[in-house]
Amino acid sequence: MSIELLVPALGESISEAVIAKWLKQVGEAVAADEPVAQLETDKITVDLPAPQAGVLRVQRHPVGATVRVGESIGTLDTDAAAAPAPRNQPESSAPPARAEQQPPAEEPVRPQASRGPIDAVPRAGAPHLSPTMRRLLREQGVDPATWKEPLRPTPAPLGLQPAPPPRGPEEVVPMSPLRRRIAERLVQAQQSAAILTTFNEVDLTAVQALRSRHQEEFQQRHGVKLGLMSFFVKATIDALRAFPGLNAEVRGHDIVYKKYYDLGIAVGGGKGLVVPVLRGADALSFAEIERGIAALAQKARDNQLTLEDLAGGTFTITNGGIYGSMMSTPLLNPPQTGILGMHAIMRRPVAVGEAIEIRPMMYLALSYDHRVVDGREAVQFLVHIKQRLEQPDKLLLGI
């Protein structure tokens, strides 16, 4: 019996994948639940297991091909035993690509005259060509009597001009599924939402002092360092409770206010920047937040993130400061209505009362969907976070 190997559902908003690797070749035996191929999406890499034991008979697509959810990428024969099969030419149900016809060996190949980027239009009667033009056409194997004058091409719109000839060595690399998806989502975010960004700065003197006082004891008791992210997560959740429009989404003509707090935390991984979700963040302690973020970051570095890890966040925090960014405007992660951007901590002179002091300062950026959140709310949201971070004892006391 033949069984089709179908691309499984890959999660919310994911409709296609790329065949990253064939783990079994045509003619090889496959055990039940043994991975046959590796599929790469814009978010994760997943193995496609065999539903039953058998022999791989058909590979419908080569490595690098894009396939859609529900599409068959191969056939498994559950009745056959493994048998040798050519591995460089996998069997395919689709007709093989037609090779270009080559002229007989004794007939020289004659180059064809270029027709230009637009179809040519025949001229009425015999063409009027100069002797030089006739000679050039004959040298190229073209009969001057059949020559067609090409239309003058219309200039391409701005941004679509033909690329100039390269001035040096170039390398052409296909865009990865992750990079394609990032591009799509960035365009989607800008086209589907009214995105504005507001900025503020926060003095982290109190947070750093608290961390220094309790770091050793915290690490001994909980087995994890007391970082900045737990303070930012706690402050963000407090602000989201005060301004629920930033923990919402637009659904059709409705605004859906989320009563739970699943925060997306942007981390760098083996496939690039991803946003796994820290679920139920409002119910977590400082130590649980630090352990949860560390676990997600490790899974991202090991390319072990699952679809469950990435789906369903209600608000996002991204920290460009770990890469040295001092200021940026983060883009929304649809369908969310807000994203908080953290940046590098810079020691700068600031006015403290009547004195000038050197303080650890960080710029904060909040991008928000103006369809749901007014500018006044967005500014107050950032001020709320700033106040909680500059008085972290209030976070600890819940006031």
Image (spheres, rainbow, N blue to C red):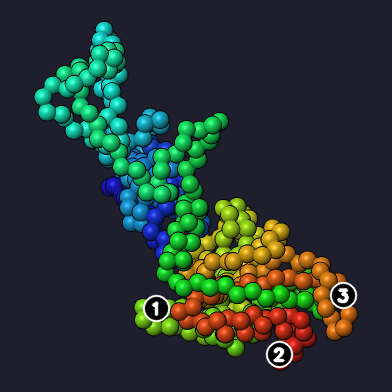
Residue 324 left/right relative to 72: right
Q: Tell me the residue that label 3 is attached to.
A: 357
User: Residue 249 location in percent, x, y?
Assistant: 46, 78
Label 1: how many Cα within 10 Å (few below 14, some 14–19, many 20+): few
The answer for how far apart the CA atoms under marks 2 and 3 are is: 29 Å
Along the viewing direction, whichever of 340 and 370 lies nearer the viewer: 370
Q: Is residue 131 left or right of residue 359?
A: left
Mark nearer the N terminus (1 vs 2)? 1
Residue identifier under label 1: 251
Image quarter for residue 221? bottom right
Nearest to N terminus: mark 1 or mark 3? 1
Q: Position of residue 250 (x, y in %)?
A: 43, 78
Q: How many numbered badges does the structure rendering display?
A: 3
Crowding at label 3, few (<14), some or many (≥20) Cα neighbours within 10 Å? few
Residue shown at the point (81%, 69%) measured from the top left: 348
Crowding at dot 2, Cα within 10 Å, few <14 / some 14-19 / many 20+, comes out as few
Q: Quadrant of the rendered structure where residue 51 is?
A: bottom left
Say if residue 51 shows up in the picture: no
- The image shows residue 100, relative to residue 71, as above or below, that is above
Q: Nearer the viewer, mark 1 or mark 2?
A: 1
Nearest the viewer among 86 and 359 is 359
Q: Which residue is mark 2?
A: 398
Circles 2 and 3 in contact, beta carbons < 8 Å: no
Height in image: 324 above or below 122? below
Q: Looking at the picture, which amino acid does disc 2 mark? A: Gly
Q: How far is disc 1 from disc 2 in space, using C-alphas?
A: 32 Å
